Image: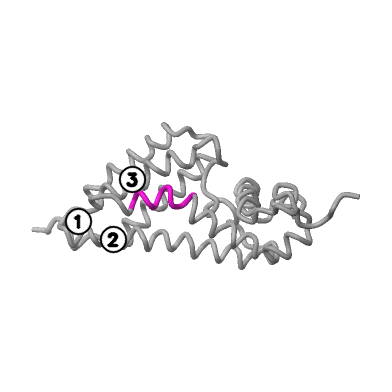
Amino acid sequence: MAERGRPRNFDKDAALARAMEVFWLKGYEGASMADLTSAMGIASPSLYAAFGSKEDLFRKALDYYAASEGGLIWGAVTEAHTAREAVETLLMQTARVFTRRSRPPGCLVVLSALHPNEHSETVRRELVQRRAQAVTELRERLRQGIARGEISPAADLDAIAKYYITVQQGMSIQARDGATRKQLEQIAAAALAAWAPLTAPTPTAH
């Protein structure tokens, strides 16, 4: 009789990576327990024992995504020399990362749970907070641009950060719909054309 439950050589990180991809492809509601256990190579009792509930597993998958996939974008952003370079890096890295053949297209945090219902409202709120955190992180990076004289002190950093994160989120949807890296780079270039008017001093009326 085959042994049930957790395999002897159970690799928790590898199983979590596979769960992340299931949520990434199917969304929180669309990912069934059967989908998850099949992808992870473990039985339901082992999944609950190792990760908790489906919601607990999803939160762990989000953390895993942030540490692995998110770092591919935001790690490069933090290394940028100027505020404009940071935004350009954000969008161009997004175009590359969201269209890799080795991963599902788009972004797990953007695509996995947009609509509230009684079963996933707490999950949706978690994702809303994570998307808001992206705005906060970009806004703080832009604030460095003011200190260095790259951005006018009169510029609305919150509006600029929200604009470019909104562009990034739209790129996620475009990627899921089949957009290529080149097409996303064209979107990024168009958005970057707004940098100068967004960050320049507001003309004084005469």
The local crowd at label 2, few if under 14, some if 14 to 19, many if 20 or more residues have their Cα within 10 Å, is: many
In the rendered structure, which disc, 3 or 2, sits on the residue that comes first in sequence? 3
The local crowd at label 1, few if under 14, some if 14 to 19, many if 20 or more residues have their Cα within 10 Å, is: many
In the rendered structure, which disc, 1 or 2, sits on the residue that comes first in sequence? 1
Residue in the image at 73% along x and 64% along y: 48
42 or 123, which lies in front? Answer: 42
x and y, in percent, of residue 32 in the image:
74, 53
Q: Secondary structure at mark 1?
A: loop
Residue most extreme to the left = 206
Magenta range? 69-77
x and y, in percent, of residue 31 in the image:
69, 52
Amino acid carrying mark 3 in the image = Thr
Amino acid carrying mark 1 in the image = Ile
The local crowd at label 3, few if under 14, some if 14 to 19, many if 20 or more residues have their Cα within 10 Å, is: many
Q: Secondary structure at mark 2?
A: helix
Indicate which disc residue 39 carries: none
Q: Which residue is mark 3?
A: 89
Q: Which residue is mark 1?
A: 151
In the rendered structure, which disc, 1 or 3, sits on the residue that comes first in sequence? 3
Indicate which disc residue 157 carries: 2
Q: Is residue 13 left or right of residue 99?
A: right
Residue in the image at 27% along x and 42% along y: 193
Q: Quadrant of the C terminus?
A: bottom left
Magenta span contains residue 119: no
